[in-house]
Image (cartoon, rainbow, N blue to C red):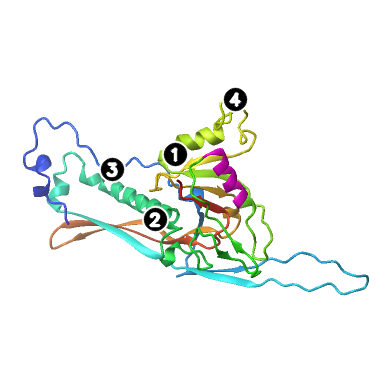
Amino acid sequence: MAHVRSNFGDLFLARLPILESVIHMRHERWPSQIPLIYSMESTAEPFRNYTGVSGLGLFGERAERAPAAEDSVRQLYDKKLTPVGYAKALTHSRETLDQDRFGVFNKMNMQLADSAGQTKDILAADLFNLGDTAAGARYLAADGQNIFDNSHPIDDGASTGDNLLASADISNVAVQAALTLLERTKDDRGLPQMIMGTQIVVPSEQRFDAAQVVKSVDDSSTTDRAVSPFVDDNFGYVVWRYLTDPQAWGMVSDFMKMTEGWVWLTQQGLDLDHDVDIRTQTAVTVATERFDYGVIDWRGMVKNPGA
């Protein structure tokens, strides 16, 4: 819908005599939180394929002069990311721009950038919000299971992987369970990877609960000023403002950045194009961007749905 003067009577037709300012309904955005969780990658190709390979098993004893037992890595699961276009257009009549006394419409390109940023942050958080329940391909890791699941297949065939905790509110015990689950994570030969959790991830509603658990010098679960079990750890929390469930929380590790875990793949950054329809003198601004995103390896992040 084009912006025309009749839709903004206060600004153009009535021109309210005591109008002192126009309130722009736009967000003063904080920096995107996507790089906190995702590996940021770019490509000029139409798509990118990700293929995993397993590690090696354990050494075995060898008798004197006996040949060493052979082992080999195996190809694992594939995942394909294909950037697609996202776009939004603004149109203004020539009269609207010419008589824009308050500079409202000449500033709307800023709102295009704001809208683009909001879109990406919401999409990025959506994988955490629905990664344990939604059935769509977007919410699956490369192994075909939900991003957060109790039964990720392990290539050794003898065990499964787990990155979904039993529902519990944030507490010392629940955080310890998350740390332990990460440390017990197995590679595709069934060997522990000793992944170290670095930060609790919480929605806005749980910021103070997270701070109380991991930042207090005293143990928040006691009344006798016992020392917090996390006080000497280089451990913190991050508020992921786009999480929609006020109860759910998670834990991340550096492992996500060391492997192809959560990937944000950009093919074209935000681009603004301008043109004028010569017949109607309507100015058009179109913002476009191309990207894709997804989870390749489920390891390195755990989720607790909350109690």
Magenta stretch contains residue 175: yes
Specify the amino acid type for callout 3: Arg
Closer to us: mark 4 or mark 3?
A: 4
- Distance from Cα at disc 4 to Cα at disc 3: 46 Å
Q: CA distance from mark 4 to mark 1?
A: 23 Å
Instruction: Point out the residue furthest to the right here.
Output: 64
Disc 1 packing (10 Å; few <14; some 14–19; many ≥20): some
Amino acid at dot 1 = Gln
Instruction: Residue 82: say if magenta.
Output: no
Give the label on residue 26, or none. 3
Choose the circle earlier in sequence order: 4 or 1.
1
- Classify residue 124 as left or right of residue 78: left
Q: Nearer the viewer, mark 2 or mark 4?
A: 4
Q: Classify 10 Å Cα crowding around label 3: few (below 14), some (14-19), many (20 and above).
A: few
Q: Nearer the viewer, mark 4 or mark 1?
A: 4
Residue 215 sits in quarter: top right
First of labels 1, 2 by sequence position: 2
Residue 47 at x, y percent in the picture: 47, 69
Q: Nearer the viewer, mark 1 or mark 2?
A: 1
Write down the residue under mark 1: 206
* Residue beneath disc 2: 123
The region drawn magenta spans: 171-181
Marking on residue 225: 4
Q: Rounded to the nearest whole Å, what is the CA distance between mark 1 and mark 2?
A: 21 Å
Front: mark 3 or 2: 2
- Please tell me which of labels 3 and 2 falls first in the chain: 3
Task: Please name the residue shown 40% across and 44% down the image.
Answer: 246
